[in-house]
Image (cartoon, helix red, strand yellow):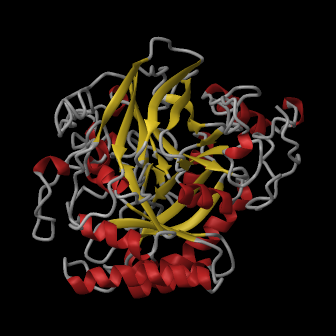
Amino acid sequence: MSHGHHHHHHHGSDDASSLPPALDMSVPDEELTPSQFSRRSMLRRTGLLGAGLAAGSVLVSAGQAAATPASTVSRGGRSDGYLWLAGDHHIHTQYSSDAKYRVIDHVRQANAHGLDWMVITDHGSEAHAKIGVEKVNPDIVDAREQIDDTLVFQGLEWNIPAAEHGTVFVHPGKNEVAVLKEFETSFDGSVKKATANTPANEALAIAGLNFLAEQVQRRNVKDALFLANHPARKGIDSPHEIRAWREAQPTIAVGMEGAPGHQAAGIKAPQGPGSGRGFYDGSPSADSFAGYPLESYRTWGGFDWMTATVGGLWDSLLAEGKPWWITANSDSHNVYADSAVRGPNSDFNANGRYNDPVYGGGLNLTDGDFWPGQYSRTHVGAESFSYKSVMDGIRAGRVWVDHGGLISGLNAQLRSGGRAVTLGGMLQVRRGSQVDLVVEVSLANGPNWSQFVPTLARLDVIQGDVTGPTADKDTFTTPNTKVVKSFVVNKSTGSVRLTYSLGQVDKPVYVRLRGTDGNRMAVGLRGASVDPAGPAMDVLGDADPWKDLWFYSNPMWVLPA
């Protein structure tokens, strides 16, 4: 499968023909350095690379499984489709008050675990605003030079005024530090003492998003994105706030974590922390949205309640026709079963960082995190291997997420009359046109990082009606979304191709996909007629993440005219 890519990659280039040698299949194995060959071998083993593979290749042709021209799928006009680049947008270093690793530690780990892109997101705080933004930047720049086949963004974890945390990140450039510093100083809830659930604080959050949009408009930075992190954990991201973020700046505020990090936190004590997956182990507070039920404070198959509930909050946004995407990531602070401790004589408040970690002599079994890419992956359909293309792919919703390497690749399309769209796309058709969903899944073809080959047991098609804007901005349900088809997958290697007919579509609808290893199942919160076998609520203190694996895709729409 030759794509005419150059052999040499200049890190962070927005040149569509530029690929790292390990990913560039026009470079023979024998021309690679030992480290490049090691990376290529690992990507092959995990199903993320391979000449001639369909959905299992990083170089997935968006129209490969189609009888339709691929160029109708690739909005950028490239007929060879997208690069599916795996990444993680939520990672903490020694510049966070509750973490410890160096930037280069995380970048090396992400690279070794198969990630193509990552965002360093140390916590917004007074110390970080004063010292950390500048101090971490040389470490990030250095890591970009050392590991040139993983894209490393600088961002921060924003304390959203009146709400939870969020990832904010910008395209690398000469003003990345200045823009992030001004944003944090002016709009961080912790810095501004604006965490309470008040209208003034909600307005400050909107002002922050407007500031980011203005920086892009003024070309101070090439691009900026915001994603809400662990949105249901504390119940303080109300539905109207989520809607307000998106409505204020729909090209900046594009989505939320469908699954939080800290996935090892549910491992049973004494082998693990004995908490909840994602450290979702809390209960409502004075600032929580009163309408949320108690079960929203727990994860479901490792996923946030807003995402895991069919017909729930995520679907209520999609039913309005609002693109709002989901991601998955590590939120890596302190890695489970690692042996590192913070460097001696550290003074975070004075220095804005901890000293470099050292060997601690024992295994950290009460830590709840995985390394970036070790368990959670966000796969983005990018036009090229570049910072801009990753950001564009996220904004476009060409995104699917998985846990534990449940599948190797996903190629999903809606098709009608010789035209097709992929994840995040909107297929415009004549009213009454026949529309089909065609899905090709590359099954896991090698062991994951827990040393077993996961098996996809079932794939669900979830479909909903687009009913338009809701009068009540605090709505978090929609009545016309349900599982419309479940495919039992009875093979364990290679790929499966599944087709579901939406029939003759005469009203706007959307579809999204979900898959499971079949280990833990329960009737969904909105009843068996909506979701007969969805994820079960995770048990506090006894939720082994490797025994309950899921993948989710972002939606595609059909818009009849």
Q: Left or right of 311: which side holds 117?
A: right
For the N terminus, the quadrant is top right
Camera-nearest residue between 455 and 93: 455
Rendering quarter of residue 98: bottom left
Camera-nearest residue between 316 and 33: 316
Q: Does the rendering let one see residue 107?
A: yes
* Image vertical order of residue 222 relative to residue 458, above or below: below
Camera-nearest residue between 196 and 39: 196
Q: Left or right of 43: which side holds 500?
A: left
Q: Residue at x 17, y 39 (%)?
A: 525
Give coordinates of residue 148: x percent, y percent: 73, 54
Rendering quarter of residue 472: bottom left
Q: Residue at x 66, y 83 (%)?
A: 219
Q: Residue at x 44, y 33 (%)?
A: 502
* Image vertical order of residue 268 relative to residue 431, above or below: above
Q: Residue at x 46, y 35 (%)?
A: 504
Give coordinates of residue 316: x percent, y percent: 29, 54
Q: Left or right of 255: which side holds 313?
A: left
Q: Does the rendering let one see residue 360?
A: no
Rendering quarter of residue 487: top left
